[in-house]
Structures are given as structure tokens and as C-alpha cells.
Amino acid sequence: METLIEQQKLIGIGYEGQNVDEFVARLTGSGTLILTDIRLNPISRKQGFSKRLLAASLAEAGIGYWHAPELGNPKWNRAGFGGSPAEVLAARERFALMIANETAGMRLDEIADAAITGAVAVMCFEADERACHRYVVLNELHRRLALCRASAA
């Protein structure tokens, strides 16, 4: 029999190249229960993806919305994620240091706890999470979930 920890589901998703209806349909199809928005500022020039409108569209689909600004990437660190492999690595390392604090840690724990009992999606703009700070957040969440599995064994 599977434990709740073994049933955890964590999804990384970007809305680049999608409209809000397509985006919500993808989340619904994946069984997502909570979308965690890790944009520092949850605004978008893309229609339907600003905090209030996105939260309303998600609510209509039965999906919760959490904004986690403490996991947002500051503007001064964003360009590195679109650079050379060395620049991407440096941007990831800087961001990992930024979220190594108690406030971000509490939010990461909250997301990991939610992923134990249901599907949680972690969202930012970029379609390719390897070119986004979402990559660092997801790696840290997977690390925390692995520790939960190890302690439950």
C-alpha cells in the first residue's frame, strides 16, 4: 500500500505561449489542486495571468491559488537564466542563496506539505523551467519531499 508521501505530486509549469483557458485546462488535466505562483510580482501583460484574474479562473476550475513572493526572483538576477550555461549556473546559485532563509523555508515547507496530499503546481512565466528560477524551487521541493520519504521509512 502506498503512503501519502509516496503519492506526492509536484508539477512545474510556465504559461509562456498559452492563453489562460489552455493553461487552466492543462492544470485540470494534471489533477492540480493548488497552483503556487512564484513570480515576485504577479502581474502580466498577457491577458488573464495577473494575480486577481488568474486566481478567479483557477477558482472556477476548483484549483486553489497561492502567491509566494518570497520565492520570486528579483529583476537583477533574471537575465542570468537566459544566458550561457555558466551564467545560468551562477543565477541558480545566487537564487538558491536567496531562498536559504527562514521565510522562504517556511513557504517551501508549506508547498511540500501540500504536495504530500495532492497535486501542487509551481508556476512562473517561462515554458522551459531550466531557464527559470522555478528550476531551483522545484529542486529544493524535491529535496524536502525526499527527506520526508526517508524519515517516514
Image: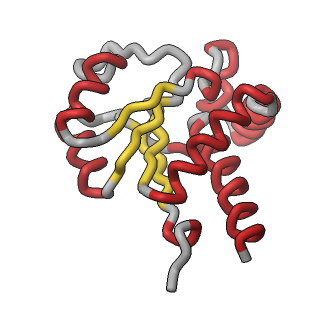
Examine the rendered structure and indicate whether residue 44 appears above or below residue 131: above
Rendering quarter of residue 88: top right
Please provide percent x and percent y for residue 18: 26, 36
Q: Is residue 107 visible?
A: yes
Which residue lies at the image location 25% right of the left edge and 50% below the top edge? 28
Q: Is residue 153 left or right of residue 17?
A: right
Q: Is residue 81 left or right of residue 34?
A: right
Please provide percent x and percent y for residue 98: 77, 26
Colour convention of the picture: secondary structure
Q: Is residue 87 visible?
A: no
Q: Is residue 105 left or right of residue 35?
A: right
Which residue lies at the image location 23% right of the left edge and 18% below the top edge? 47
Q: Nearer the viewer, residue 153 or 85?
A: 153
Please provide percent x and percent y for residue 93: 80, 36
Q: Nearer the viewer, residue 68 or 134?
A: 68
Which residue lies at the image location 73% right of the left edge and 77% below the top edge? 153
Q: Nearer the viewer, residue 129 or 118?
A: 118
Q: Is residue 62 left or right of residue 104?
A: left
